[in-house]
Every structure is written in structure tokens, then in C-alpha cells.
């Protein structure tokens, strides 16, 4: 796995110059650094008539692409062809002689950023609404006619020097494509289990490896590739905390071309809070989330609903492995870590049995 760099700090003058490259007429009033992953992200206040317009700039931390150019094209495609709430992309700069690239500028959307672990404390009514909306948006995403093979989504279009992406699904492609889903999934699982062997759950790695080897052989097709969000989690949403309304879906750099069911199962597991159920104040709400997501999905794409209606244990297990691999990134209340770890272990053992 590639080493993840530290976020690069940019001066206010550099950020202002980056904004001018997209829109020379924009007057930057405020620049605020945002702590969001390893990319350099800045909130920018722009003078706009009698008010201040809020924009966001997202840039590479080290000059490498880190899927930033593709992310901007995906957001433009979703804005143009779906109901998925994504920030409007105002312009992309793929390369520049003096400015840090690649980067793109987008319009801010309302809503609160909530911690990943907050999903365990959302009440049932709010979680039901969030899950229904997620189901609707996944159905819209999975309906975009953009990919015909499996793998990491990339873009195949002209470089931009400040212009807007066209938002055409045909410009999205797949890097190192796999013709069959089982071949890509095996590679994906092998990579995740290599990480798992270095995690705090490494005692489960050998049994998981044997289980996946048997389970992957039993998967039933046919498998149709769709755009898969995959990077699910409350931290990648903007939400109205009172109603559960999803006001924005952020961070599309990890988009994969996968079967719809794979993407759906990841979302069910991660939004259910099951991985936090070792805490006494958190319950496993997979049934609630699955039912609500299915209802939302059927409302938008009833013709695709059969593909996601039957739970697939291999896909849920892949989501569990992801949580175990990233466990040290979770923020848990003091004294609850051991109980949460043991509950995850119990869930994995139950699945393996």
C-alpha cells in the first residue's frame, strides 16, 4: 500500500492564486485550512455581491494525483446526471508550472460534518432517514452508465487548466481493469488481508484467508460493474443532525467499479454501527439500515433492486476487514476499546462459523 503523505500547508497568497487560475474575477476574502484527510483542503470566503460565498479547494499534498483529478470528474458527472448531492465543481487545474497541482475548486454545501463514530449515537428515526436517502443515492449512482469492467475508476479526458469538467459518464474509465469480478475481488481481498496481518486483529487473519478462499468460489453471477462509492461513513457526508437529511456526499477519490451488491453491503455494515456495538450505549442496527436502504433503493431503481436484495456474507466480511484494518483510526471513549474489539472479534467468528 502506498505511504500516505502529510497534508501540505499552503499560504493564503498561494490559495488566492489557485482560485484566480479557475476564476480570475474572484476576490478572496478569507482562507481557512480544513483538517480533512491527507489532502490539502481550504475553506475560502469569496466576496459575492452583498454576501460571502463559501468555496472549498482540494489539492494534492505532494504533487501526485491521489485520484484528485478523477474525483472532480466524478462529482461533475454525478451533478449532471443524478440526484446525488455533491459539491459543484467550478474548475480543475491538472498541472501548472508554479502552483501546487493537481487541485480543484468546488462550491460549499450546507450541513454538519459528523465524526465517523457518531453513527452509533444517532437515534433510530434519524438513522432510518439517513439510510433511506443513502439507498436512493446509491440507486442513482449505480444507474450511471459509466463503466464496463472492474477496478479503480479513473478518467480519460483532456487535461484542464482551470475549466470545468464536462460531466460526461463516457469520460470515466477503469485503471488496470479486470474483465471478471472474481479476479478483481481476489486481488482486493488479498491486499486487505495483507494489511490485516499487520493489524491488532492479526490472530483472525489465517481463518479469514481460508474462509474467503472458499467463499469466493461460491459467489453467484452474473456480475455487472457499476460506479461504487465504497468509501462509506458518516465522516464523508454533510448531514442535518436534527433530521438525518444528507445534504452532501463528499470524497469520491476511492470510487471503484464493482457489482452493486458489494457497494450496498459495505454501506449497510458501516452505517449500522455494528462495529461499535461493543459499547453499552450502541446497538447493532443492521436490520434497520438494510430495510431502509432497500426501500430507498427500490424507489429509484426498482429494476436493479434484485441485485442488492440478498445479503452476501463475503461482501460484509470485506467491510469488517476494512474496519479492523483501520481500527486505530477510530476515536472511542476511554475504557471502551477492549469491549469494542472483542465484539468485532465475536462477529467475525460468528461469520466464519
Image (cartoon, rainbow, N blue to C red):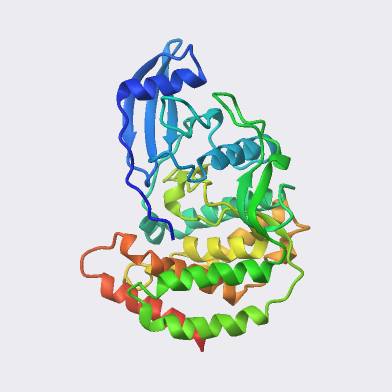
- Quarter of the image that includes the N terminus: bottom left
- 233 vs 25, nearest the viewer: 25
* Quarter of image, res 329: bottom left
Horizontal and vertical percent for residue 276? 37, 68
Q: Is residue 168 left or right of residue 279?
A: right
Horizontal and vertical percent for residue 7? 33, 42
Looking at the image, residue 257 lies above or below residue 349 = above
Horizontal and vertical percent for residue 226? 69, 55
Residue at the (45%, 33%) spot, across then down: 101
Q: Can residue 287 be seen?
A: no
* Quarter of image, res 218: bottom right
Residue at the (61%, 81%) spot, across then down: 215
Looking at the image, residue 255 lies above or below residue 347 = above
Looking at the image, residue 237 lies above or below residue 272 = above
Horizontal and vertical percent for residue 17? 40, 19
Q: In this view, does 213 lie to the left or right of 1?
A: right
Q: In this view, does 137 lie to the left or right of 273?
A: right
Residue at the (48%, 62%) spot, across then down: 270
Residue furthest to the left in view is 334
Residue at the (69%, 40%) spot, across then down: 171
Amino acid at each position: 500500500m502506498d505511504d500516505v503523505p502529510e497534508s501540505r500547508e499552503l499560504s493564503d497568497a498561494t490559495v488566492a492564486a489557485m482560485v484566480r487560475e479557475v476564476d480570475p474575477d474572484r476576490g478572496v476574502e478569507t482562507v481557512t485550512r480544513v483538517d480533512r484527510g491527507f489532502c490539502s483542503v481550504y475553506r475560502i470566503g469569496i466576496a459575492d455581491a452583498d454576501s460571502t460565498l463559501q468555496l472549498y479547494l482540494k489539492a494534492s499534498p505532494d504533487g501526485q494525483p491521489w485520484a484528485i483529478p478523477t474525483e472532480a470528474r466524478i462529482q461533475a458527472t454525478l451533478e449532471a446526471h443524478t440526484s446525488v448531492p455533491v459539491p459543484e465543481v467550478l474548475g480543475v487545474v491538472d498541472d501548472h508550472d508554479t502552483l501546487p497541482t493537481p487541485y480543484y475548486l468546488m462550491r460549499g454545501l450546507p450541513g454538519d460534518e459528523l465524526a465517523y463514530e457518531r453513527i452509533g449515537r444517532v437515534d433510530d428515526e434519524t438513522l432510518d432517514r439517513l439510510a433511506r436517502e443513502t439507498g436512493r443515492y446509491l440507486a442513482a449512482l449505480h444507474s450511471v452508465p459509466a463503466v464496463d469492467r472492474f477496478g479503480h475508476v479513473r478518467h480519460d479526458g483532456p487535461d484542464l487548466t482551470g475549466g470545468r469538467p464536462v460531466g460526461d459518464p463516457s469520460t470515466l474509465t477503469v485503471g488496470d481493469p479486470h474483465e471478471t469480478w472474481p479476479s478483481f475481488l481476489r486481488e482486493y481481498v488479498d491486499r486487505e488481508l495483507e494489511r490485516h496481518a499487520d493489524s491488532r486483529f492479526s490472530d483472525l487473519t489465517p481463518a479469514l484467508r481460508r474462509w474467503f478462499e472458499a467463499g469466493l468460489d461460491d459467489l453467484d453471477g452474473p456480475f455487472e460493474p457499476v460506479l461504487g462509492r465504497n468509501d462509506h461513513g458518516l465522516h464523508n457526508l454533510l448531514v442535518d443532525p436534527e433530521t438525518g437529511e444528507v445534504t452532501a456526499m463528499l470524497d469520491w477519490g476511492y470510487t471503484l467499479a464493482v457489482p452493486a451488491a458489494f457497494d450496498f453491503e459495505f454501506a449497510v455494515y458501516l452505517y449500522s454501527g455494528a462495529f461499535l456495538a461493543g459499547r453499552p450505549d450502541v446497538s447493532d442496527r443492521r436490520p434497520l439500515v438494510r430495510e431502509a436502504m432497500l426501500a430507498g433503493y427500490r424507489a429509484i431503481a426498482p429494476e436493479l433492486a434484485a441485485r442488492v436484495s440478498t445479503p452476501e456474507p463475503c461482501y460484509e466480511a470485506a467491510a469488517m476487514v476494512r474496519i479492523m484494518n483501520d481500527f486505530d483510526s477510530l476515536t472511542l471513549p476511554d475504557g471502551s476499546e477492549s469491549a469494542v474489539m472483542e465484539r468485532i472479534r465475536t462477529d467475525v467468528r460468528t461469520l466464519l462459523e
